[in-house]
Image (cartoon, helix red, strand yellow):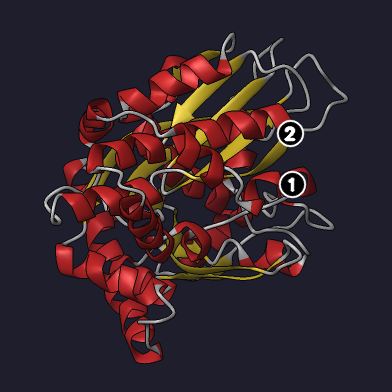
Amino acid sequence: MIVIGLMSGTSADGVDVAICEIRGRPGDMTVDLLHGDTFEYQPEMRRRIFSCCDPSDSRVDEIATLHVDLAEVFAACALAALQKADMRLEQVDLIGSHGQTIWHNVLPSGQVNVSLQIVEAAVLAERTGITTISNFRARDIAAGGQGAPLTSYVDWLLLRHATNWRAVQNIGGMGNVTFLPPLADETSQPVAFDTGPGNALLDVAVANFSDGEMKYDRDGRFAKQGRVNEEWLDELLRHPYYERGYPKTTGRETFGTAAALALLEEAQNRGLQAAEIIATLTALTATNIAEAYRRFAPATIHEVILGGGGRRNPVMVGMLRQLLAPATVMTHEDVGMDSDFKEALVFALLACETWQGRPAALPAFTGARNASILGSITPGMNYPELMRRA
């Protein structure tokens, strides 16, 4: 099948598009990235997304309008990517759209009772004519799971090592990890959960100190200029989320803009300067990841595969290499996968699995009572042909 995966992460940088060719079935599956593209949001669209994520600022009419407006953006991005790939709409079987997470509600017990991703699938199906699968998290949550991390299923299918335990570590707005047993191990179960904040706190701090001119700490320039404040870092690492057992997930509700601004105020009251604050927040991400491995890894981790924007921050990667030694720290490119479009590829593959009627949320990853077939299907003009072939 040819499937388009569409993804916008918690950092809300833009829309990632992955046009994929998917063959086979679990146990013998290949996924080829035919074309990948990223379309950055206009500043006003990004502002609207963050406003709708903030319960003190959001309004139901604004969320409803964004639900449709963002779908128009997603549809335009899919069409533009097809044009750049010199492909026709008729060649595509499905669209898998993650949408944009607006709210991920974690109860005090650690259970997730709702996770809201917007982007109206009907608009995607209407604008493209392609059958669209969306709303991937809801079914797993209904089965008692966290609804995340959904990337773990793809890690399990495509990234296990023959003999070594691997960790697949994403560092986006939030961080999440999948601990993968080797192919030779037929008894051990994988483990997956969110490690904590990835770039979300950092990005807010950098935007604040640069008066909005920078969205993130490019090449770790801020962090290189400062020293980690160990006393403050120790206090930050006492957040109860880090010690909570898995399955667990988190989001901007806990580690988003409001939390970041409160931390900046606290740090400035301590007399910390901008570079010192950025260096310490960088260390927070690296250290909470390393501490998660120490607490929860089921076995010794030999290899760590980094993905997400955090892999481009040399200061953060250097800290991780030091903290996770003797494990080898590498990127998805080292194992033949494009880091930039990994998450969009995930939702292309999940859409394919939904269409084939196969579960893609497994209890080992999300803590659900049972495995679930994910997503909601919105028929496009190609739906009758898909049904005929099925």
Horizontally, residue 38 falls left or right of residue 141, namely: left
The three-letter code of the residue at mark 2 reads: Phe
Q: Is residue 180 above or below residue 110?
A: above
Circles 2 and 1 in contact, beta carbons < 8 Å: yes
The residue that label 1 is drawn on is 246
Q: Residues within 10 Å of mark 1 (few under 14, many from 20)?
A: some
Q: Viewer-proximal residue, 362 or 268?
A: 268
Residue 147 in the image, given as x and y percentages of width and height: 64, 59
Residue 296, label in figure: 2
Give whichever of 208, 253 is nearer the camera.
208
Q: Is residue 377 left or right of residue 365?
A: left
Circle number at residue 124: none
Q: Which image quadrant is residue 171 in?
A: top left
> Disc 2 versus disc 1: distance between alpha carbons?
8 Å
83 vs 329, left or right, is: left
Kindly identify the residue that appears in the image at 67 percent across and 40 percent down. Answer: 192
